[in-house]
Image (cartoon, rainbow, N blue to C red):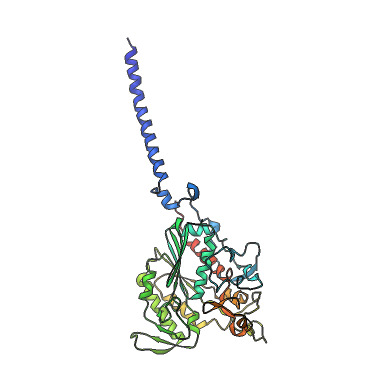
């Protein structure tokens, strides 16, 4: 007579357990279904890999960061043909003819195999996946002239090989070029603004250095394209230095006057600094300023008694060197403006380290006015060698390694 009550008690005991199991299984099913969808916050943060597998987060480790007391701009170039170059011309379809020196006939490739080594520390090895993780959901923009465009192309080449075909795109929308890593929702961009402030040379292709007219207090038109960009890298130098005087306006655009270049540069930099203070959120945005890229126009500076230029140079300068093409007054103006700025701007002082690299320029293996040099022009390197722009792979890769190192310094790992 006790069988039925005993069975009832067992059923009553097992029922909550069965119900709990069903709830656990149901919840697990919902979680798995969500994980399979692109709505998962995990995949919104870390992304999906090829083949349906999911990408693990990339963490910046302590060894990825250089010592805080280290001056990464003081050092030497070390021969390293095992680890360098970081890419090849053939592997990167985004290079312009101005930088593809090998393809254009340069017989040596030694300039590709040098690594910049700071004296007091070691730069972290460039890792394109870590950079893309840092840039996830963000925009990195290079702003300046054709030297800055070379740095932009260098950075694109340094990361693009790890992105599968179909997951990357490249668009030319003058005055911009935009490379996108679709899986990361990240972009690396370039904006043509040779003076940073507005000028009659702001057309992306139809411009000349011979006729310069700069609006020293006008920047709003450019600034609209810079608003909200997460990482801004500015540069402006070579276009200012064509002659010691420059035509410019300040206030009324009808009042065109000749300014001393250093005076005009200071006014332009102050206009830029005011724009930063009005438009940059230092918590969310990072701003960098590249120091001047040196020229190697006169070989007598590093080889007394000679009368040539960067043509046929295959080795860096050994020992202390500062060329007359790098204007110390301009350097001081930049330093003064950045010190007074209310916005934190990281100054990337690449001038001295680049001064040593007389071997890294395009020389006669580049282009002029959109066309490669003719045979006749190449036979006259003293007149036609380009000792301003750099071959790629090459010196601008080191600039980007330093920029990458600073981005690692400031990156907060997400959990």
Viewer-proximal residue among 313 and 131: 313
Question: Where does the image place residue 353, in percent across and percent down from the top left?
Answer: 58, 73
Q: Is residue 300 left or right of residue 56?
A: right
Viewer-proximal residue among 347 and 215: 215
Question: Where does the image place residue 311, in percent across and percent down from the top left?
Answer: 63, 79
Which residue is most to the top?
A: 1
Q: Is residue 103 left or right of residue 348?
A: right
* Badge count: 0
Which residue is most to the right?
A: 305
Which residue is most to the front?
A: 375
Question: Where does the image place residue 131, in percent across and percent down from the top left?
Answer: 50, 60
For image coordinates 33% across by 22% down, the residue present is 12
Q: In the figure, 414 relative to 397: above or below?
A: above
Q: Quadrant of residue 66?
A: bottom right
Task: Using the rendered image of the protein, determine whether residue 69 is visible from the camera's viewpoint.
Answer: no
Question: Where does the image place residue 28, in percent across and percent down from the top left?
Answer: 40, 38
Which residue is most to the bottom?
A: 258
Q: Quadrant of residue 29?
A: top left
Q: In the figure, 204 relative to 412: above or below?
A: below
Task: Using the rendered image of the protein, determine whether residue 33 is visible from the camera's viewpoint.
Answer: yes
Q: Quadrant of the N terminus?
A: top left
For image coordinates 42% across by 44% down, the residue present is 36
């Amino acid at each position: 007579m006790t069988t039925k009550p005993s069975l009832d008690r067992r059923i009553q005991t097992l029922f909550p357990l069965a119900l709990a199991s069903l709830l656990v299984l149901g919840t697990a099913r919902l979680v798995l279904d969500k994980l399979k969808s692109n709505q998962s916050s995990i995949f919104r943060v870390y992304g999906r890999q090829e083949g349906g597998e999911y990408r693990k987060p990339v963490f910046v480790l302590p060894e990825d960061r250089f010592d805080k007391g280290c001056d990464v701009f003081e050092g030497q170039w070390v021969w390293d043909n095992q680890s360098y170059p970081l890419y090849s011309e053939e592997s990167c379809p985004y290079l312009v003819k101005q930088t593809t020196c090998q393809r254009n006939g340069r017989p040596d490739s030694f300039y590709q195999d040098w690594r910049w080594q700071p004296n007091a520390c070691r730069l972290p090895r460039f890792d394109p996946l870590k950079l893309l993780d840092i840039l996830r959901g963000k925009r990195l923009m290079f702003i300046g002239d054709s030297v800055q465009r070379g740095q932009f192309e260098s950075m694109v080449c340094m990361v693009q090989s790890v992105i599968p075909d179909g997951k990357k795109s490249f668009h030319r929308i003058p005055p911009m070029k935009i490379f996108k890593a679709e899986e990361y929702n990240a972009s690396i961009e370039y904006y043509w603004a040779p003076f940073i402030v507005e000028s009659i040379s702001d057309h992306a292709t139809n411009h000349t250095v011979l006729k310069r007219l700069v609006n020293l207090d006008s920047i709003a038109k450019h600034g609209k394209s810079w608003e909200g960009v997460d990482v801004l890298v500015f540069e402006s130098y070579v276009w200012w230095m064509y002659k010691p005087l420059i035509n410019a306006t300040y206030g009324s655009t009808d009042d065109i006057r000749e300014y001393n270049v250093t005076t005009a540069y200071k006014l332009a930099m102050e206009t830029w600094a005011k724009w930063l203070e009005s438009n940059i959120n230092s918590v969310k945005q990072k701003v960098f300023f590249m120091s001047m890229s040196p020229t190697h126009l006169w070989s007598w500076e590093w080889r007394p008694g000679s009368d040539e230029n960067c043509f046929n140079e295959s080795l860096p300068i050994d020992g202390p060197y500062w060329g007359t093409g790098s204007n110390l007054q301009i350097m001081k103006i930049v330093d003064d403006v950045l010190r007074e700025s209310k916005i934190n701007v990281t100054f990337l002082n690449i001038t001295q380290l680049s001064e040593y690299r007389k071997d890294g320029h395009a020389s006669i293996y580049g282009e002029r006015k959109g066309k490669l040099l003719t045979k006749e022009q190449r036979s006259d390197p003293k007149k036609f060698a380009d000792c301003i722009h750099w071959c790629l792979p090459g010196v601008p890769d080191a600039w980007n390694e330093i920029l990458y190192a600073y981005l690692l310094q400031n990156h907060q790992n997400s959990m």
